[in-house]
Image (spheres, rainbow, N blue to C red):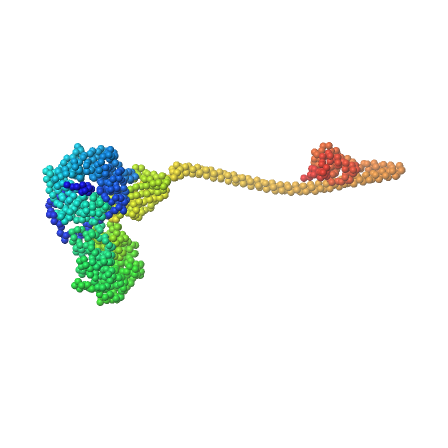
Amino acid sequence: MINKTTQYFNINNVKRCFEILFVLLSCVAFGQENPENIPVLEKLSQQPNVKHFTRDDFNSDSQFWIACEDSDGTTFFGNNDGILIYNGTTWSMINLPNYSSVRSLMIGDDGTIYAGGYNEFGTVTVDEFGAYHYHSLVKESGLENVNFENVWQISKVKDYMVFRTFERLFIYKNKRLTQIPATTSFLKSYVINEEFYVEDANEGIFQLDLDQHYLKKVFDAEVYDNEFIIGITNFSNGDFGLLANNGHVFRVQRDSGISSQQVNISSKEKEYRIISFLQLKPDTYLLGTLRSGLLTFRWNSKGYTIEKTAHLQDETVLGLLQSKEGNVWALLDNGIDNIDYNNPKTTIFNQASVYDVLVEKAHLYVATNQGVYVADLSSQNRVGPESFQLINNTQGQAWSIQKVNNTILAGHDKGIFKIEQKEATKVGYQNSFWKVIPIPGKANLFLGCSYTGLFVVSENHGNWEVKEKIKGFNESSRDILAGDEPYTYWVCHGYKGVYKLTLNESLDRVVAIDHFTDQNGLKSPYNINVFRWKGNIVFTTNNGIYQYHKKENKFEPYQELNSILDKDKNTRKLVSDSSKTWAVVDDALGYFDHESEHPEFVKDIFLETKGTFNRGMETIVPINDANVLVGTHTGLYLYHTNTQNRAQNIPTKLVSVKYTADEEAFSLPLVQDSLITLPNSATSVRFNFAAPKIPNNALNTYSYKLEDVDKTWSTWQKMPFKEYNLLPAGLYTFHVKARNTLGIETTPVTYKFSIAPKWYQTNFALVCYVVFGLLSLFIAVKLVERKIEKQHLQAQEREQETNRLLQLEVKQLKLERDKERIEMAKRHLEEDVLKKSKELANYTMLLVSKKNFFNELQEELKELRNIVKTKTSNKKLTEIFHKLHQHKIDEEYMKVFEDNFENIHENFFTALKQQSTELTKREKRLSAFIKMGLTNKEIAPLLNISTRGVETARYRLRKKLELPTEESLSKFLEELAPED
């Protein structure tokens, strides 16, 4: 009878392959293999690598119950918080509606994940955006108020899903749910050959009839002693095999119900409580226990063995899941461990930094920075980190571990130590030795290579002694190699170059030293190492590999190796075995087949070791053609070089694609039925990716390329995402691929999208631009034509203007000539007028003078006539009067005056008439005389009036001309009808 405390540990579906177990156990004795017959390589190579995942990794509760894997390699874990999802790179969590723990998971034929918790079960699906969602079948079926407690198992049988609780079974198909109650309590269910079996406590094993939905008993619980059955299988003859949680294995005949116990895995010395089970290989099973960790159960024709698998982070293994790639997930009470059985790398030792390794008979020695460790290879268990013990007295920096004349010697910071079993004894009193090397031709003499030169070390019947230091050389001799000539040695110093030493035959002095730095063919004295390859002494440098030619005393490139290894990178180590040459190039380990016609340097499976080697003390120990021990800062590892890349055409997975616009994030669909167009406001696009199906995916690196943005694929990056910012409008194709530490690459995944153009980048805008451009071109052409026409018109106008100006100039010239003529005529006229004016004035003055003369003469004659009394005299005087009268100034003279005046002063009389029409002839003549500037006295004779009469006449003239008193009559008449 199994109590419920034990029942809570049934977690995982059991592998259904027990037939081999019973067949083999029936025909072999149960004794264990002889440890002495276990090969050393087998002891080293079958220890799997374990990757621990803790709360710091998944950020959730650390107790795990169940796991399943979907088609693309994503793993789903059930824990006390819900469903934890791991895509090989990142973790995410979804919760059940009631936030209960998840005790059961199963994937359906269509890829749907079914999950069960407390009073809850349903499905997990992923949407087009890569987000996971939970859908409750309890709510869909109206079971919200039913208390059925935990769903412990979910089984897929044909096209049914069966959910098991302690008190009932829920049978689900096509959205229909059927319930079958338990007689006592359903403890465990199993699916064998598409048939569903369930164990009912105290009742036995029942088979479910899916057509009739009822349970038919197969056999009673007494058949298996009422023990809690972890797994069931059936054999070809119909018999059942049962594995109980206490380690008992039963075989039960189905027809008769007769059972027999075949084997008991537990013993009096060690009792196991098995709570999970997994068949790893046909002859290998994994057993998860309650408090004994994970056990590996192996059997063959010689018997069976059971041993503890590599240390897990917790001893309670609640469940086991084997991935499609062959790795095993161990679901622990505190964490998750991934056990990699297919990795070409096996961790042998991880407690210190490794500098040298020696495999000697049944022991494995490791020289480290903490001392010398040893593991016993004769033990039945496989060798792992827990197998090593520190040898007494070796604490501190150990540089080398060697077998010399059947003695194990360690080069140590404290000196040379002789190791016997697990104890170390110091040889001599000297300190600081790198290693010991043989002296050719001297069977019992050796060179002790120290920090400060060379010592002679001797051996006599197992007794070792460090003699005096060899004089003449005081440099560090860590990197030393015996030359081709007797007593010659090559010593390379990391900073000082190469020394060629010649010792005397008594080995107490260096008699010759040739020191090479950056001369004699070497480009630099730094980072030079010396090795023997194919019988030749070669020197590795930062600039390729060289060989020394004694005749020329010169180092020359060694083409055979330079053609294989990158001569532009530093080669620090060369180790050869029968067909392979191992090298550390640019701090990365690789190998090539030196017997091949076209050797190729292979380093993919060693990518994880890059940058982890102890510089100048790289540890590479080939065990055979396919296996090599590699020591690094982090420990000692065994690599299997013939491991095939078991995974081909592995897809890369896009986890999500998101873009940001207006400071808000949006998801894009991962399944592209049509081209996805992002708005033109998108400022960034982020791709999250993973490779769940690639082996050893916890250390993936990624390379990506965005067409038309990235010219080439990026270098390998650890970050599982890539973000592009401020992409311009256009069509884009994103590619990403993954690579693990074994060099396995996934097939790239492609994602196409476009970014919508800004409004000014659209086709409509483009059409508008074209139209606008054409219109602008048309307008420009028209404007140019108009401009040309305008320029033509302007040219014509300028020509016309020029012609006009020429004409004007001609006219101007003509005018100037005319003007000159006019001016000349004017001058002539003015001169003529002036002359005439003078003549007129003279004439006028003559008239005045004549008039005065006649008047005076006439007066005098009158006086004379009064005096003369004779008739003759009177007659004569009368004749004189008559003649004077004939020549007096009469109207005829005045007419001449007026005509001359009019010629000189044109329009004067017309203008005067316009001033007043009432002027008399006398007044007009008065006006003319005044205009000529004659005085009243001069005017009086001309008018035959007195001076007073002239004044009176002037007065009357002013009145007729209506001149104000203050205005001068003379000035008025002078300005009237002025001369041009």
Relative height, residue 574 to residue 654 (above, below):
below
Residue 807 visible at all: yes
Relative height, residue 39 to residue 809 (above, below):
below
Left or right: where 905 falls relative to 104: right
Quadrant where the C terminus sits is top right
Q: Position of residue 840 (x, y in %)?
A: 74, 40
Q: Position of residue 260 (x, y in %)?
A: 11, 42
Q: Residue at x 25, y 54 (%)?
A: 633
Q: Position of residue 385 (x, y in %)?
A: 21, 52
The part of the image, by quadrant, that contains residue 175 is top left
Q: Residue at x 75, y 40 (%)?
A: 934
Q: Residue furthest right?
A: 870
Closer-to-camera residue (218/285): 218
The part of the image, by quadrant, that contains residue 957 is top right
Relative height, residue 918 to residue 716 (above, below):
above
Q: Position of residue 562 (x, y in %)?
A: 27, 55
